[in-house]
Image (spheres, rainbow, N blue to C red):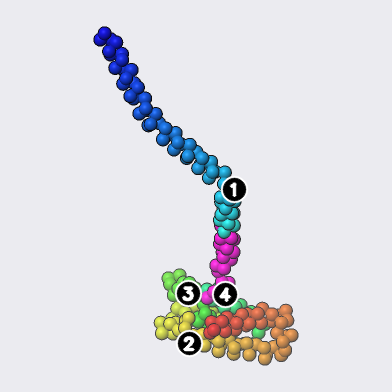
Amino acid sequence: MASLCLSSSRIVSLHHHKPCLSLKFRPRISNLSGLSHSASAVSFNPLRLSSDRQRTASSVSAKVEKRRKRGSSVVCYATPMLSVHNLQWISTISCVALMLTRGTGIHKSFVVPLFALQAPMGIVSWMKGEYGIWAAFLALLTRLFFPFPGELELPFIALLLVIVAPYQVMSIRGKQEGAILSLAISCFLAFQHFSRAGSLQKAFDQNSVLATVAIIGVTVVSILFLI
């Protein structure tokens, strides 16, 4: 009898617990079904797919345009060819050519101060340094015993002038006063060269074409320094 009572009590308890289990699991099944329906509705929405494709296409095109703009902007950062340093070297080479050439009728003594005013700072520092002083000393020592060629007299005088020039004179380099003085000297040399050549055609002959190009180079550089 006791076992029958226990079994009956277990059956009753099972009958009481079954509805609770069904109540717990039914809402979960309904929620999952609702989520699956909503996910399927979202995943198969053709309007959303088309809008996503348009967004990705627009973003890709915007990136490509940015890259093109960046690539084209690199050309704008080119270094200028007519910088101050390059102009100084052009003037220095032209002055040395005028000192050494023979196809001109100018007073070459005016080329020496023009060289001192427009030479690059590296050359001036080298001349005023230890190496320049030793070069001047050896040149003077050689000059005592051997005559210099006529073409080397002016470069030697230019070296001595730069070495012994005071600070007040060399301080006008790179300033408006120095640019005006350089332009006056170069214009005077150009006037002498072309007036003594006789004509423009003779100025570009084989014997005087180097001097003509050097005169033009010095004058153009002096004008650019003043601008």
* Helix, strand or loop under label 2: helix
Residue in the foreground of this view, choosing between 53 and 150: 53
Please give the range of residues in magenta: 63-84
Rendering coords of residue 157 (x, y %): 51, 81
Residue in the foreground of this view, choosing between 6 and 99: 6
Q: Which mark, residue 82?
A: 4
Q: Quadrant of the C terminus?
A: bottom right
What's the residue type where badge 1 is placed? Pro
What's the residue type where badge 2 is placed? Glu
Give the quadrant of residue 60.
bottom right
CA–CA distance between discs 1 and 2? 78 Å
Above-or-below relation of 38 to 108 = above
CA–CA distance between discs 3 and 2? 17 Å
CA–CA distance between discs 4 and 1? 62 Å
Crowd around label 4: few <14 · some 14–19 · many ≥20 (10 Å): few
Q: Which residue sits at x=35%, y=22%?
A: 15
Q: Which residue sits at x=59%, y=54%?
A: 54
Marked residue nearer the N-terminal end (4 or 1): 1
Residue on which disc 3 sits = 121
Rendering coords of residue 204 (x, y %): 71, 82
What's the residue type where badge 4 is placed? Leu
Residue 155 visible somewhere in the drawing = yes
* Helix, strand or loop under label 4: loop
Residue 97 as seen in the image, left or right of residue 202: left
Going by the picture, which residue comes out furthest to the left? 2
Residue on which disc 2 sits = 177
Residue 214 as seen in the image, left or right of residue 142: right
CA–CA distance between discs 3 and 4? 17 Å
Q: Quadrant of the N terminus?
A: top left
Residue 100 visible somewhere in the drawing = no
Rendering coords of residue 200 (x, y %): 72, 87
